[in-house]
Image (cartoon, rainbow, N blue to C red):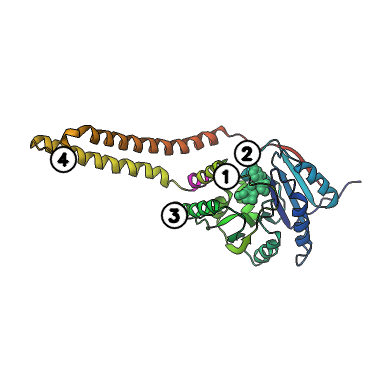
Amino acid sequence: MQQPAEAPPTLSIVVPLYNEEGNVAPLLERIVGILTRLPGTPSYEIILVNDGSKDRTLACIREEMRRHRNIALVSLSRNFGHQIAASAGIDIAQGDAVVLMDGDLQDPPELISEFVEKWRQGYDVVYAVRRTRKGESPFKLLTARVFYRTIKRLTKVSIPVDTGDFRLMSRRVVVALKRSPERHRFLRGLVSWVGYNQIGVEYDRDERLSGETKYPLPKMLRFAIDGITSFSDVPLRFASYLGFFSSAVAFIYALLVVGFKLFSLHPPGYTRGWASTIVAVLFLGGVQLISLGILGEYIGRIYDETKGRPLYLISEIERS
Ligand code: UDP
Ligand code: MG
């Protein structure tokens, strides 16, 4: 018998998962628990994006799909990274509002009820601001602090500080995101860029329930550079400021040298002239390398974008 076409759900919860075998069951337990207790019991779907996990994550998801309804499993063809896995889930989500959250229960699902309340009041984006963060190393806390404040100074888009990707987005924000095909995705920046009515709610970030972080230092750095280069051209201009500054210093230095020569003066250190030469060469060399490096970061990204490959490939979609 032909099934009647179902109306799209009110809420979509999108969770990217990479090697989270120990977290899938408790995560669903808590999400379903909170969703079924929401005022007005809105219809929902939970989209689990398996980002090429190498452990039992996929099997765990399948097990949970036998237990819970309204779950969609989206498997990517390999590991594409957190931001792209999240984008894949958002692309598939059909809800009037889409909530994005991590799969390690660092983002407490209970906050969804506050999100929905604010959304019903007319906000398009409700983002979670981390009041405190449990179970993170002092190094991660410090670098995150510095990063959010740096990017805030470097860009005109107002990206809220201490805010991750845990948030609710209305349909028109999701539509705007889907129209932004950029590959080096910094979702929290993109969502801020979209605009409309945005509001933050504070929460205490929990420890990861099980497993290890999937953001070791090199990945974290890449992510930070993606964020800055996607939303700021200040570093590009910084290269030219640095160039101007060092040329000015070099010019003054040249005048001095010529002056000393003309008046046959012997400044202190005259006989050790090579030292100043070396210093000048090293300084200029350094400035040039930094500038080239910054150019490289941007050109690499232009190259990536021009290839125009799809953001991700899906190997299967199943619904329960
Ligand atoms: N994640 C993913 N693909 C990756 C890396 C991470 O889908 O390549 C998921 C991961 O399973 C988790 C979320 O992204 O649900 C955030 O990752 P993690 O908790 O490791 O980051 P942290 O909280 O340490 O910054
Ligand atoms: Mg985490």
User: In this view of the protein, which residue sits in the foreground, 193 or 274?
Assistant: 274
Task: Report how far apart the C-alphas of labels 4 and 2 lie in the structure.
Answer: 61 Å
Dot 4 lies on which element? loop
**The magenta segment:** 226-231
Dot in front, 3 or 4: 4
| Disc 3 + disc 2, Cβ < 8 Å | no
Q: What x and y, as percent, mark residue 19?
A: 70, 43
Task: Report how far apart the C-alphas of labels 1 and 3 lie in the structure.
Answer: 19 Å
Dot 1 lies on which element? loop
Pick whichever of labels 3 and 4 is earlier in the sequence.
Answer: 3
User: In this view of the protein, which residue sits in the foreground, 212 or 162?
Assistant: 212
Reply yes or no: does residue 312 show up in magenta.
Answer: no
Which residue lies under the disc numbered 3?
153
Q: Amino acid at mark 4?
A: Pro
| Disc 4 + disc 2, Cβ < 8 Å | no
Which residue lies under the disc numbered 2?
311
Dot in front, 4 or 2: 4
Q: Amino acid at mark 3?
A: Arg
Note whether ligand 1 is within 8 Å of mark 4: no
| Disc 2 + disc 1, Cβ < 8 Å | yes
Dot in front, 3 or 2: 3
**Is disc 4 surrounded by few (<14), some (14 to 19) or many (20+) residues within 10 Å?**
few
Which residue lies under the disc numbered 1?
185
Dot in front, 4 or 1: 4
Q: What x and y, as percent, mark residue 257?
A: 16, 37
**Is disc 2 surrounded by few (<14), some (14 to 19) or many (20+) residues within 10 Å?**
some
* Image label count: 4
